[in-house]
């Protein structure tokens, strides 16, 4: 094995300890301490008060809307992400770089600006507002606007996870499948999908996490109507502004619980992907 493939760590033990300590300190101050404060404040008046805040009708409505928006946005972005990644990684065409730029657009645009764009398009005085009003359809200050805003801010996650994986794999296996007579769908289900399944799951998990926690874009298009257009993050803001701190932190702890579940799923996917990669590497070494 060459020296390049097995680099020697030259830092002293003191430097390594210092770097690890700084990383742990940073994580403790920025991540662990705020989470501990949320849990402490949520349970400040006991489990009964915590459950009462969670079981309240407006909180349950906010939870349902959050899960509904994620349940629509994630599958939509899954389909878009696979199609976009396949086009970028497997084909050469005019406008390819423009497509990549557009995929990255939500990373560069403030979520608040994204919400304002939808207000300008579908608001009462927007481009399509009068036509929607004529047919008694509401987008802004209604569930469709929240779903659209959620889709916008989350659509890069699946595509951005898949593009580098599919580019690294190339198109040799798909070409072999086509040579053997496989149709496009057969090639996708039996060749492409098994090769990208872990990256796809990882992207879906990240997309779902962002969808459930989105605040800026949803805040602009929701109208903050209690029980109707408030998601969990918006419900937390309203409770906090009303100085109902226990209920606000209780709802925030529910969001934190959803985030922890997402984190566990992400870790499981990463572990399974690493195990699959090791198994594939061993198989290649055995065959060679």
Image (cartoon, grey):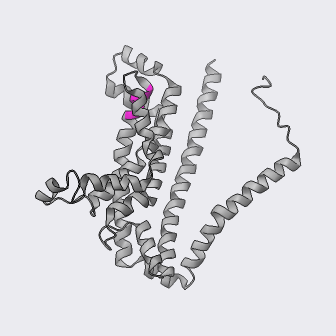
Q: Is residue 161 left or right of residue 226?
A: right
The residue at 61%/20% (across/down) is 287
The residue at 37%/22% (across/down) is 93
Q: Is residue 85 left or right of residue 257?
A: left
Residue nearest the viewer, comparing 279 with 126: 126
Relative to 266, say whether 170 is above or below. Answer: above
Position in image of residue 145 (x %, y %): 29, 57
Is residue 190 visible to the viewer in this orientation of the structure?
Answer: no
Q: Is residue 242 left or right of residue 267?
A: left
Magenta part of the protein: which range?
84-89
Relative to 22, say whether 224 is above or below. Answer: below
Is residue 279 visible to the viewer in this orientation of the structure?
Answer: yes
Position in image of residue 9 (x %, y %): 82, 37
Residue nearest the viewer, comparing 32 with 258: 32
In magenta stretch: residue 86: yes
The residue at 41%/50% (across/down) is 153
Instruction: Tell how many labels.
Output: 0
The residue at 58%/73% (across/down) is 39
In this view, the residue farthest toward the top is 179
Residue nearest the viewer, comparing 282 with 76: 76
**Secondary structure mostly taken by the magenta-highlighted segment of the chain:** helix
In this view, the residue farthest toward the left is 134
In magenta stretch: residue 283: no
Position in image of residue 215 (x %, y %): 43, 61
Q: Quadrant of the C terminus?
A: top right
Position in image of residue 185 (x %, y %): 32, 28
In this view, the residue farthest toward the front is 125
Q: Quadrant of the N terminus?
A: top right
């Amino acid at each position: 094995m060459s020296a390049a493939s097995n680099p020697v760590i030259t830092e002293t033990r003191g430097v390594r300890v210092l770097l690890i300590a700084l990383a742990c300190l940073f994580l403790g101050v920025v991540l662990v301490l705020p989470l501990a404060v949320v849990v402490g404040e949520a349970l400040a008046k006991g489990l009964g008060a915590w459950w009462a805040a969670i079981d309240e009708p407006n909180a349950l409505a906010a939870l349902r809307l959050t899960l509904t928006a994620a349940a629509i946005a994630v599958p939509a972005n899954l389909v878009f992400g696979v199609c976009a990644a396949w086009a970028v990684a497997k084909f050469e065409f005019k406008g390819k770089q423009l497509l990549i730029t557009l995929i990255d657009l939500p990373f560069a645009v403030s979520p608040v600006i994204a919400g304002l764009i939808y207000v300008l398009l579908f608001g009462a005085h927007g481009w399509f507002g009068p036509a929607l009003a004529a047919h008694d359809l509401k987008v802004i200050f209604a569930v469709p606007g929240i779903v659209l805003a959620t889709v916008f801010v989350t659509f890069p996650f699946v595509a951005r996870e898949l593009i580098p994986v599919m580019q690294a794999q190339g198109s040799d296996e798909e070409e072999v499948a086509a040579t053997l007579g496989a149709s496009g769908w057969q090639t996708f289900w039996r060749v492409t999908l098994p090769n990208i399944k872990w990256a796809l799951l990882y992207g879906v998990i990240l997309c779902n996490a962002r969808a459930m926690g989105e605040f800026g874009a949803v805040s602009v298009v929701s109208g903050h109507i209690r029980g109707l257009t408030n998601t969990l993050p918006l419900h937390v803001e309203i409770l906090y502004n009303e100085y109902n701190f226990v209920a606000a932190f209780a709802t925030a702890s529910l969001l934190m619980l959803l985030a922890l579940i997402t984190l566990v799923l992400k870790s499981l996917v990463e572990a399974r992907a690493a195990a699959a990669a090791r198994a594939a590497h061993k198989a290649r070494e055995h065959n060679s």
